[in-house]
Image (cartoon, rainbow, N blue to C red):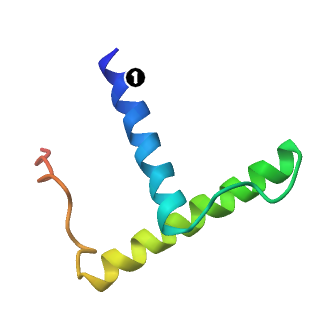
Amino acid sequence: TQLRMNRSIQAEGSFANVKEDMNFRRYLYKGTKNVLAQSVLLAIGFDINKLHHKIMAGRTGTHLFELKKTA
């Protein structure tokens, strides 16, 4: 239950960012293939925008948590 709840929150947060930041309100085309294609383009655009902001902030070589040392 905890994993499912966490996953639903994460997906909702990303979709909310796409709606707000990219001003996405509705799909422009009908049909499963067209909706899937537009969703993929939105996801790629979101990731590129996220990477751009990370590069501009100089955070490309950092990790969220410290990496564990392996033998």
Coordinates of residue 59 in the picture (x, y in percent): 23, 75
Residue at image location 23% in from the left, 82% down from the top: 58
Q: Amino acid at mark 1?
A: Arg
Residue at image location 33% in from the left, 81% down from the top: 55
Q: Is 29 left or right of 14, judged from the image as shown?
A: right
State the image quarter where residue 9 is shown: top left
Q: Is 14 left or right of 56, judged from the image as shown?
A: right
Residue at image location 50% in from the left, 72% down from the top: 48
Q: Outermost residue toward the top?
A: 1
Residue at image location 85% in from the left, 56% down from the top: 29
Position above or below: 54 against 41: below
Position of the N terminus, as image quadrant, is: top left
Q: Is 23 left or right of 29, judged from the image as shown?
A: left
Position above or below: 53 against 22: below
Coordinates of residue 8 in the picture (x, y in percent): 43, 32
Location of mark 1 (residue): 4
Position of the C terminus, as image quadrant, is: top left
Q: Nearer the viewer, residue 52 or 10?
A: 10
Q: Nearer the viewer, residue 1 or 26?
A: 26
